[in-house]
Structures are given as structure tokens and as C-alpha cells.
Amino acid sequence: MPKPVQQAIVIGLGQFGFTLARTLAERDVEVLAVDLREDLVQAIAPYVSDAACLDATETESLAKLAPKQRDFCICAIGDDARDATILCTALLRQLGARRVIARASDELLARILNLVGAHQVVNPEREFGQRFANQILHAGLLDEMRLGDDIVVSEVECPRAFIGRSLRELTLPARFGVTVVALRRRDGAVKMPDPNTPLADGDVLVIVARDGQAAKMSERS
């Protein structure tokens, strides 16, 4: 039985919202993209299921989008419209949205958005800055994704000292506190790790660990 298609509303089509809406659509999510600016709505229209030009801080206009029927609603309104972000987030909750994700540029706004009912608050600029700083400082660290306050999934280039050795032999959990959950081979194939198979040049390790542990492993290897 095919998996049901997810439906989403993305409100606010600045750089973050536009990219988010387009990426979700590329991953087979039915996206309704919304903004006050007609030019942004027209620009996103070819990439999403539907696009609407309206004021998402007006209850009647927002209700017409049927947020209760969507799997998730994202308030991606820009930094120059804090009041609109707060009001839109609160209205989405009042209209029964199942999952509301709101963008905040600072801690005060994040606290307010949590208070008015956001299920999740994101700060993409801060998160990207943290990830990019780690990539600059640790050359072998390719990407990171947080699973919580202290747990991170990291992609790390296989250190030269690991090439030709198996995960069983390397005992990474004991030595560095990291767990390899997948391997991405040079040809792009992603596989579950075989603890007895030697690692090869070009392998990328997908690691789950506490924050900073993958970088320490990369440095010390």
C-alpha cells in the first residue's frame, strides 16, 4: 500500500521559506505556499502544488487554507514582521493545525512562539552558523543534524587511520563514544555497516553521538 502523500502549508516566501517550500515539494510533499507579495507567489508557483497571495494574520483568510487538514504548517515569515509571526502562529493553533513549526531569529521571539502554541521553533541562521563553524574547524566533518539538545547525527569522511580496518576492530563506541549507523560509499550507495568489513578510502561514516564527539574522533584519528 503506497504511503499517503503529506500536505503542508509554508507561510512566508523569503529566502528560507522559498527554499523550504521548494525542497519539500521536491520530496513529494503537497505544498501550499503563501505570501503577501504577489511576485514571490508567482515565483514559487511552478514548484509547488498550490500558491496563494493573502494575509495569513487574518483569521478568515487563514481559515480558507484549511490548516487543520494539513500534516504540518510552517510559519516562515521574515525577521521584519515579528508581530505577524506571533499572530500567524497563534491563529494556526486556534484553527486546529496538527503541527505548527515557526521560525524565530532570537531567543525572545522563540519563547513567545512557544507560549502561543508552536509545536517546534527553529532558528535556521543560528543552526546553519553552528554547523558551518564545525565544518570549518573540522575538515573531515561534512554535515550535522541535531536530534535533540545533545544528540547529533554527523557525516564524517573516513579518517585515513581507519582505512582497511573494520568497525569491530576500531571499537569506536568505547574509544570515542560514537556509533556508526550507516556508511555512504564512494559511489553514493548508503548501506548498513557490516562490523567485519574493512572501511575503504572515500567512505563516509554516518555517526550518532553526543555533540562534539564526532569532531573529536575526526581530530584524533
Image (cartoon, rainbow, N blue to C red):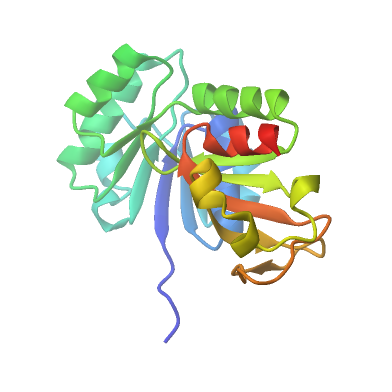
Give the position of the C terminus as an image quadrant: top right
Identified at 34% across, 32% down, the residue is: 56
- The quarter of the displayed image where residue 192 is located: bottom right
Identified at 34% across, 15% down, the residue is: 107
* Residue 130 visible here: yes
Between residues 40 and 23, which one lies in front from this camera angle? 23
Find residue 109 and report its horizontal and vertical position in percent.
32, 16
Would you say 5 lies left or right of 117 here?
right
- The correct choice, above or below, for 191 with respect to 69 in the image is below
Identified at 32% across, 55% down, the residue is: 70
- The quarter of the displayed image where residue 135 is located: top right
Identified at 37% across, 30% down, the residue is: 55
Q: How many marks?
A: 0
* Residue 58 visible here: no
Find residue 106 and report its horizontal and vertical position in percent.
39, 14
Find residue 80 and report its horizontal and vertical position in percent.
45, 12
Give the position of the N terminus as an image quadrant: bottom left
- The correct choice, above or below, for 52 with respect to 197 in the image is above
Between residues 19 and 127, which one lies in front from this camera angle? 127
Find residue 113 and report its horizontal and vertical position in percent.
26, 25
- The correct choice, above or below, for 48 with respect to 140 in the image is below
Between residues 110 and 170, which one lies in front from this camera angle? 170
Would you say 34 lies left or right of 57 here?
right
Outermost bottom residue: 1
